[in-house]
C-alpha cells in the first residue's frame, strides 16, 4: 500500500472520531489507532524508509533565503516566509534559530501552507530587547506581536517544538483569537506536574552554556539531546541529519531561556481552557520531554489527538521528516 493511500485511510479513520481524544502509536511498519472510548484498534500498513541526510536530499535551501525583519515592542524580529496557502507559524525550541527546522519538513508543509519561521527573542537575528529576564508569557506576546506586524488578520495554525510548544500553549491561552489549530511537538505542561528528562539532559544543556564552544563543538551536544542513543549507533552519520548552524548558540540566551522555563508556573491547571483543535506529537524515545508528558497534555486538552512515533527522539522530525510531515498535514487538513 502506498504512503498516499495509507494517509488517506488514516484521515478517514480520524474523521470518524473527531469528538474524542486519541492515541496513535506509529511504529516502522504499521499505524495503531485507538482512543479512550473503547472503539478498538485499527492497523494500517505504513512503510517507513530510513531517511537520508535531510540537508542534502530533496531539501529547500532555507538558510540562503533572505531574512526580513519587523519591529515588535522593544525588539526587531527576524523571519522568513515560504509556500502558499493558509498561514502556519512555527515556533522553535531552546537555542534554535529558524534555520534549525528540517528542510524536508518545511518543503512538505509549504506545499499547501504559507509557512512562517522566525527567531525568538535573543536568538539568531532577533534582538534581545531591553528586558533583563525572559519569560514564556513574554515570548507569547512577542509572537502575537509578530502576527500583528505581519498584518495576518485571521487565526493561524501554530506548531511549537519543545520550548516553542510552551510558547504556543501560552499564545493559545493568552491570545486565543490568534490561533486556529495547535500542534505541540515534544512538549509538557511545565511546573511541578511536568515529568523531567533524564539527568544527562541537564548536563548537555549546561555544556551549551560554555561561551568557548564553536558550532562544531556544539553539534554533538545538540545531537545527544535530539537523538536516541541506539538510533545514533545505527546512524553513524547522525550529525548530517541536523541543519548546519550559521553561528554558535549564544550561551547567554541559553541561560535566559533556561530561566524562563524554570520560572514558568506551567499550564497544567489551565489546559482545559484550550478549545482549539490540538495535536500532540512526540517520539517514544524522547529523553528531553518524556512521552508521558504528552499523555498528560492529551488528557487535559479537550478532544486532543496524540501521536507517538516509535524510535523518535526529541528531534524526531530530523529522523523521520516525511512521516512527521504526513501526520501534521493529515491533522491540519482535517476539518
Image (cartoon, rainbow, N blue to C red):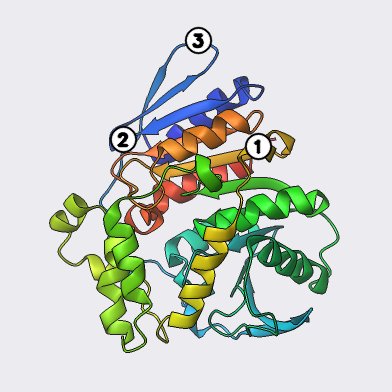
Do the residues bearing badges 1 and 3 touch, measured as CB atoms within 8 Å? no
Dot in front, 1 or 2: 1
What crowding class fits label 1: few (fewer than 14 Cα within 10 Å), some (14-19), or many (20 or more)?
few
Assess whether mark 2 and mark 1 are in contact (beta carbons under 8 angstroms). no
Q: Please say whether residue 217 is visible from this viewpoint.
A: yes
Q: Is residue 275 visible?
A: no
Quadrant (top left/top right/bottom left/bottom right) for the N terminus: top left
Mark 3 closeness class: few <14, some 14–19, many ≥20 residues within 10 Å = few
Q: Secondary structure at mark 3?
A: loop
Name the residue that disc number 1 marks.
269
Pointer 2 residue: 27
Left or right: residue 151 versus residue 226 is right
Residue plotted at (36% across, 59% down): 318
Name the image quarter holding the C terminus: top right
Determine whether the residue tagged by mark 2 lies in a helix, strand or loop: loop
In the displayed structure, 304 sits above or below 189; it is above
Residue 24 image position (x, y, % from top left): 44, 30
Residue 38: image tag: 3
Question: Compared with residue 173, is residue 167 higher up or lower down, i.e. above or below?
Answer: below
| Residue 186 numbered tag | none
Amino acid at each position: 500500500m502506498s504512503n498516499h493511500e495509507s494517509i488517506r485511510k488514516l484521515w478517514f479513520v480520524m474523521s470518524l472520531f473527531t469528538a474524542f481524544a486519541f492515541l496513535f502509536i506509529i511504529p516502522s511498519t504499521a499505524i495503531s489507532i485507538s482512543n479512550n472510548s473503547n472503539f478498538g484498534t485499527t492497523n494500517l500498513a505504513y512503510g517507513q524508509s530510513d531517511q537520508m541526510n535531510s540537508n542534502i536530499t530533496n531539501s529547500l535551501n532555507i538558510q540562503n533565503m533572505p531574512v526580513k525583519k519587523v519591529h515588535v515592542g522593544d525588539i526587531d524580529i527576524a523571519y522568513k516566509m515560504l509556500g502558499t496557502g493558509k498561514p502556519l507559524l512555527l515556533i522553535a525550541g531552546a537555542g534554535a534559530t529558524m534555520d534549525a527546522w528540517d528542510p524536508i519538513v518545511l518543503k512538505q508543509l509549504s506545499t499547501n501552507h504559507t509557512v512562517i519561521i522566525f527567531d525568538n527573542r535573543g536568538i539568531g537575528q532577533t534582538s534581545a530587547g531591553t528586558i533583563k529576564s525572559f519569560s514564556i508569557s513574554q515570548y507569547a506576546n512577542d509572537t502575537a506581536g509578530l502576527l500583528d506586524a505581519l498584518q495576518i488578520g485571521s487565526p493561524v495554525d501554530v506548531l511549537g517544538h519543545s520550548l516553542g510548544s510552551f510558547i504556543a500553549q501560552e499564545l493559545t491561552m493568552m491570545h486565543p483569537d490568534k490561533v486556529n489549530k495547535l500542534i505541540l511537538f515534544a512538549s509538557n505542561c511545565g511546573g511541578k506536574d511536568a515529568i523531567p528528562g533524564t539527568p544527562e539532559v541537564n548536563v548537555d544543556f549546561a555544556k551549551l552554556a560554555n561561551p568557548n564552544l564553536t558550532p562544531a563543538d556544539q553539534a554533538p551536544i545538540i545531537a545527544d539531546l535530539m537523538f536516541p542513543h541506539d538510533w545514533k549507533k545505527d546512524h553513524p552519520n547522525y550529525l548530517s541529519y541536523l541543519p548546519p548552524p550559521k553561528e554558535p548558540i549564544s550561551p547567554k540566551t541559553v541561560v535566559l531561556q533556561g530561566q524562563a522555563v524554570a520560572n514558568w508556573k506551567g499550564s497544567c491547571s489551565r489546559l482545559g481552557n484550550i478549545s482549539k483543535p490540538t495535536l500532540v506529537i512526540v517520539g517514544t524515545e524522547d529523553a528531553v520531554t518524556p512521552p508521558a508528558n504528552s499523555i498528560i497534555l492529551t488528557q487535559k486538552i479537550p478532544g486532543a489527538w496524540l501521536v507517538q512515533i516509535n524510535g523518535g527522539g526529541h528531534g524526531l522530525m530530523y529522523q523521520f521528516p516525511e512521516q512527521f510531515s504526513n501526520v501534521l498535514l493529515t491533522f491540519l487538513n482535517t476539518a
